[in-house]
Amino acid sequence: MDTPKRHREIFGIVLALVGLLFLLVNNGLMWFGWGAIWPAFPLLIGVFVLKLYATGRKPEQLFFGLLATGLGIFFFLFSSGAMSWGAMGTLWPVILLLVGIALLALSASGDRPLPALVVGLAVVIGGVFGFLATTGVLGARVLVPIVRLWPLVLIAAGALVFYQARQDRLEAVAMDRRARQDRLEAAVMGHTREPDSKPVSGDVSDREI
């Protein structure tokens, strides 16, 4: 089956299910309200984008799909009552971990993995330190220098992204220049090449005489 048509079929099914859900909730036919089920929307979007990645293999689809799915599951634990919203003060670093994991997956699937790898590792480390801070494992003596100096990670990541983008641009310019030079050389060779001469039958007969 054609892949774009398959994607439209899946999107149509998801759209119909969302419409059915709206209809049931708005008419009081469900025992829960929007406050409990809203995380289902980023979850469904994430699953759909991951399905697109399974066929398209675009790195940004993997990043957004993993992030939306993870955030949907995380917030659904709170909205469904499985966990108290008061625990968010301790568990908020999970969001950083989800972003970092999505960036690491992006670095593993992309053509230019280094910037995503550096930023992903930095965000994961930030999430780990966030957990240590919210659970009281790290004291103020350790946290204060981290809070003051963490922007250095962003500076390093920005410099790395700038360097990578500049290298890509220079490579593209060099390739374009080589392509134009090759076309020019091919044109010059085409003009200077002499056509193959073939003997005329009359000349051959005269020489034989």
Image (tube, rainbow, N blue to C red):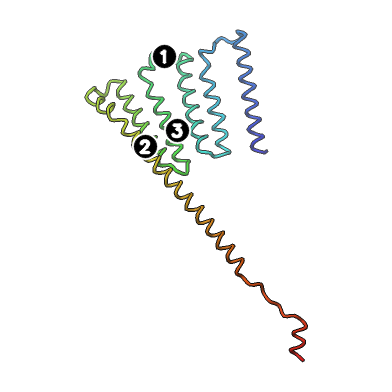
- Identify which amino acid the numbered label 3 is placed on: Ala
31 and 108: which is toward the camera: 108
Left or right? Give the position of 107 relative to 25: left
Task: Spot the residue most to the bottom.
Answer: 209
Residue under label 3, please give it: 102
- Identify which amino acid the numbered label 2 is placed on: Ala
Numbered disc in front, either 1 or 2: 2
- Percent of width and height locating residue 9: 66, 30
Q: Is residue 82 above or below residue 154?
A: above
- The image quarter containing residue 114 is top left
Q: Is residue 29 above or below residue 47?
A: above
What residue is drawn where x is 43% and y is 34%? 103
- Percent of width and height locating residue 65: 51, 31
Label 1 or label 3, whichever comes before in sequence order: 1
The residues bearing labels 1 and 3 have C-alpha atoms spaced at a distance of 24 Å
Residue under label 2, please give it: 157
Left or right? Give the position of 92 relative to 187: left
- Identify which amino acid the numbered label 1 is placed on: Trp
Q: Secondary structure at mark 1?
A: helix
Label 2 or label 3, whichever comes before in sequence order: 3
- Percent of width and height locating residue 105: 45, 36
Q: Is residue 160 above or below residue 183?
A: above
What residue is drawn where x is 50% and y is 54%? 177
- The image quarter containing residue 4 is top right
Residue under label 1, please give it: 85
Label 1 or label 2, whichever comes before in sequence order: 1
Q: Is residue 58 above or below residue 208?
A: above
Q: Secondary structure at mark 3?
A: helix
